[in-house]
Amino acid sequence: MPRPLRLLMIFAACTLVCGVAALAFVVSTGRVPRGTAQLPEQAMANLSIPAFTATDQDNKPVDRTLLLGNVTIVGFVFTNCPLACPNMTFQMSKQQQALKDTPVRLLSLSLDPANDTPAVLKAYGEQYGADFSRWTLATAPPGVTRKILGEDLKMHVAEDAGMQLTTKAGQQMNNIQHPPHLFLIGPDARVLGLYNANHGEDMVRLTSDARQAAQRRAGR
């Protein structure tokens, strides 16, 4: 079996198992487990993206002010990711197109600053048709983005030494476990919703929610 197909089948099986476990957890406890998209508004209530500093694809500094005053779709990815990230970034590109008549912005934050330099991120964005006037790809100092995702947004993110990846430069690195979700962030940097990039209905809902949030921001 070709390796890409084998990886896709493994990912699909893991997603199914995790989904069943998450549903069982919700039914038995009434709570939403960390890192799932069950009841996103309740699960993400009162969470926000804190102050941070990073460097964008043009090697320019960016920080939390990029979010303030805007409605933004945020994804956490890394360019050497063979599983969740390609689809997450593809879905970001689809959101960019679907929301082109709105002021909604997009931000992709790298989980792998060791390999994702500004130049690498720019090439990655170009691969997905990023309009850099609206879609920022950024890399932060080691640990910053993982802290935001893991501690501030309460999602699971961890090194996975059991799965070795070969980078585009031919080096070995650990896989980085992270959720396949996109976040809708409001003008005050607070989370408005959480959406699974692998679920078509979630992506439709994200487009609608982002559009409505932008209209509210404009006072319509």
Image: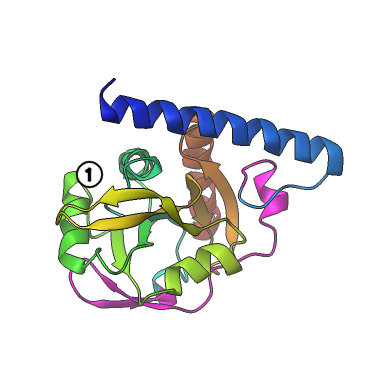
Which residue: 51% across, 53% down? 184
Which residue: 57% across, 28% down? 16
115 vs 14: above or below: below
Q: Is residue 196 magenta?
A: no
Disc 1 residue crowd, few under 14, some 14–19, many 20+, Cα 10 Å: some
Residue 99 percent location from the top left of the image: 37, 43
In front here: 54 or 14?
14
Under mark 1, the amino acid is: Tyr
Q: Which residue is mark 1?
A: 128
User: For numbered disc 1, what is the local secondary structure?
Assistant: loop
Answer yes or no: is residue 168 visible.
yes
Which residue: 45% across, 64% down? 70
Residue 49 percent location from the top left of the image: 53, 69
Which residue: 35% across, 27% down? 6
Answer yes or no: is residue 187 visible.
no
Give the left or right position of residue 166, taking residue 21 as reference: left
Q: Which residues make up the magenta segment?
A: 36-65
Residue 204 percent location from the top left of the image: 49, 33
Task: Identify the residue at the far top of this view.
Answer: 1
In front here: 91 or 146?
146
Image quadrant where residue 87 sits:
top left
